[in-house]
Image (cartoon, coloured by chain):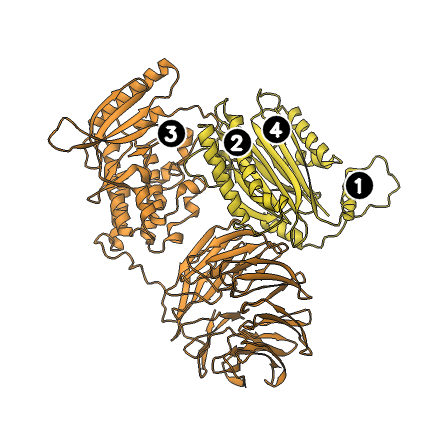
Amino acid sequence: MGVGGMGSVYRARDLHFPNVVKLVAVKEMVNLAPDPQVRKVVIQNFEREANILATLTHPSIPSIFDYFSGDDRSYLVLEYINGKDLEAVIRDTEGFLPSAQVISWAIELCDVLSFLHNHKPDQIIFRDMKPSNVMIDNHGHIMLVDFGIAKQFQVGQKGTMIGTEGYSPPEQYRGEATHLADIYALGATIHHLLTKKDPRLEPPFSFEERPISAYNPEVSPEIEAVISRALAYEPKDRYPNVAEMKEALMAAARQTGLLSRMPSSKAMPTIQSEGIKPLWKFKCEDEVRGTPAFYDNTLFMGCYDNNLYALNAADGAFKWKYPTDGGIVSRPAISEGNVFFGSEDKRLHVIRATTGKIVWSHYADGPVRSSPRIAEGHVFIGSDDGCLHAVNSISGRAVWAFNATAAIRSTPFVANDLIYVGSENGEFYCIDFKGKVKWQFRAKRGITSSPLVTEHAVYFTSLDGHLYALDPKSGWVLWKFRLGKGSISSPTILDNLIFTGAADGFIYAVDMRTSKEAWRFRTDHQVTGSPVIYRDALYCTSIDSHLYCLDAKSGQLRWKFATEGPITGSPLVYDDIVYVGSTDHQIYALLA
Amino acid sequence: MFDKIKKFFQKETAEPSIKNESETVPLSPQQVEDIITNQSIVYELPQLVAASGQSVGKQRELNEDSLLVISTTLAGNAGNLPFGLYLVADGMGGHQYGEVASNTAMRIFGGYIMEKFHPYLFSLPTAPLDESLQDLMLAGVAQAQEAIQRDAPGSGTTLTAALVLGEQVSIAHVGDSRAYAIYPDGRFDLISRDHSLVGRLEELGQITAEEAANHPQKNVLYRALGQGDVLEPDIFTIPFPKKGTLMICSDGLWGVLSEKEMHKAICDADTLERACQNLVNAANTAGGPDNISVILVRMIG
């Protein structure tokens, strides 16, 4: 059935009952002690503990039928449990286990621990509470397996090390094991079940820094408080006994309606989605799929009614609009009082920010869905004609066009005298100011996402479902982070975290040094827009038609705002105001 | 830590110049440092220089540490890139197996990384590497873990490895060997985080640094290569400490000398080799209770 550190577990048939199939589990323990005297002591201890166990009668403790010892092995014959252990349950469950289920197991575990702790004449400390030692039988009830009995067979020669299990309390390392240690380990086990964060992979005693609600928002604060107390660093700060912990769990479960097995997803609706009123909104004549720009108290926004709108940012009053011959998804860039933007009419348009009068335009051979980047007196912009165009930003004179062979919808990034851009066939280019390739990298699918370049890395996502970090000088992949699905969202950064959205509907936060996920937030549809950071908040849109405001550090929802259609573009935050366009034809301004 | 490095890089990088002072002999440590810094200007290509030192110490009979030092450049369409692989492994557990574990870690991890880079070093570069550098390090650690559990069961080892490519260094770390970024101005930044019980208690404020230094369970690790079914190494990428020195060492060095003493031993030396010997000698003079291993790496040019 399994092989552990000290021996194997066998499924066996009890031949005392030849006419029926009675299954038992036989646990084999190998006696590794080299010294004959020590071996004898090990066997004696084993038999003493087996005798104690044999006297225990509890529905959550498997019955012991027999034990015997051979040369270098000892065997324990016990009740066969048809089920699987909690570690396997955690592993095989998609998403979180329902809180109601976990709490009902926790209450059963309290019962059996309480039984052991109150055992007379000698209290029994389980010592090894962890998911792999709890079986769930076919009826959904818990069974405590693998009593400390096996411990006798562990060889203690490892002098300089101990393998902590991550569930053990701090005082265990001082050699203390009281019933309060079992309470801590029970807390750790429930923490693991609710968060799916394996404590063996985290620094020891770090539960306090990893509150349950940071991973699983469905767990109520009441339940969280009970688990936190069980996990107190000092034994005296925990529940004095398991019975009290059970009481507290029941009370918390009752309060949140878990006890009556109400669907646990009914978490408290603390956030009002309808309570937020926009400062103003402005209606265009078609879908707004792009991202706005702000300049001189004016908001510039392209629309699929082919116009670029200029609105008064304070009240949304219409200033002027500039008609093109195609839809505008490109995000405008502003330089020297001019507004630069691309249109599906195959042109890069440049107009005066104050009047909306044309300054010059540049013709490409395909729709321009990339956004312009202005640097060093030039504007760089991609087009569906497969070229990255470099144009003098003052005169409008074309300087060069870099042929990428596939459409460029990604917005170029300019840093260290180099231009970084992705293309729809998955190639990523680093080009110098002469239009020559410095290095290139190939993703498995298209790169619509616009790169973000820091001194140390180039970050972008791809439709191949990865967030990439590349060395900016050589293009070597430093790390890649697996997203649930492809992405066209462009990453953004705050402190040590990098954020991006993906088509799986999640907004991800990833540690830039370790490439480990810090948090993820689920929206109800694809996230194609790019997250935006303002102060300590993250703003992001979703095709589910909402604008979300999250706490950037934790990913907790602060508020959300529903528009009347899917949002494909990104928000803009300026001076405490968030601006966002929606496919419901409207542009909204909200208080950040 | 990371921010500190970042800040350092954002600062204007003023080149210290040799002062026109009349006295020339003997040179002060600062003057030596200035000469080194100044000389480095003549190298136009960035390149890695490294040295190492090892000693069994004064109280042990066996050396259970292993180390690896490889510095070269990697040809590519973006020009020659500095490439370096440096690691220290400190074996422990049963007397018989400690050196097997650390040596296995060195061979398997080092071998895995070098095998992956073999085509880029010794063949014409063809397809780019499919895995990221962090993926490589993770896979290398997993292979070493498996090999140790198979060949030296019951033993364990620390592993602190640095893979330098261009101006980035990716670190894989398990246990209580350490990586530092050391700067001429006296800054001594610990890059890695010990996976030791005492270190964790200190982080939590349960014991003081002083208590930690004398704690009876000072050597107890909660994470080591070869131990446990699940092993999660720390893997991260940071900019190489330019103008500074990357140091990787076992606890036979950092557990015996203060940061100040280590800094002095490095700065008093005119070459990296001498600096390594100074460090080893200082640790032995202080009692040498454990095996000592140290690697120093600089990027010049």
Using the image, name the chain to which the residue with label 2 belongs. B
Q: CA distance from mark 2 to mark 3?
A: 35 Å
Using the image, name the chain to which the residue with label 3 belongs. A
Circle number at residue A176: 3
> Which residue occupies the foreground of this view, A286 or A343?
A343
- Tell which circle, 4 or 1, labels the residue nearer the N-terminal end: 1
Residue located beneath label 1 in the image: B31
Tag in front: 4 or 2:
2
Q: Position of residue A132 (x, y in %)?
A: 32, 38
Residue drawn 21% across and 54% down? A260
Q: Are marks 4 and 1 on the same chain?
A: yes
Q: Colour of chain A?
A: orange
Residue A353 visible to the viewer:
yes
Q: Position of residue B216 (x, y in %)?
A: 50, 27
Give the chain coloured yellow.
B
Residue located beneath label 2 in the image: B104
**Image position of B33 (left or right of A537):** right
Q: Is residue A503 above or below residue B288?
A: below
Which amino acid type is shown beneath numbered disc 2? Thr
Which amino acid type is shown beneath numbered disc 1? Gln
Residue located beneath label 4 in the image: B292
Residue extending farthest left: A19
Q: Are marks 2 and 3 on the same chain?
A: no
Residue drawn 54% across and 69% down? A407
Tag in front: 2 or 1:
2
Q: Is residue A514 above or below residue A15?
A: below
Which amino acid type is shown beneath numbered disc 4? Ile
Residue drawn 34% across and 21% down? A31
Q: Position of residue B4 (x, y in %)?
A: 62, 49
Residue B193 visible to the viewer:
no
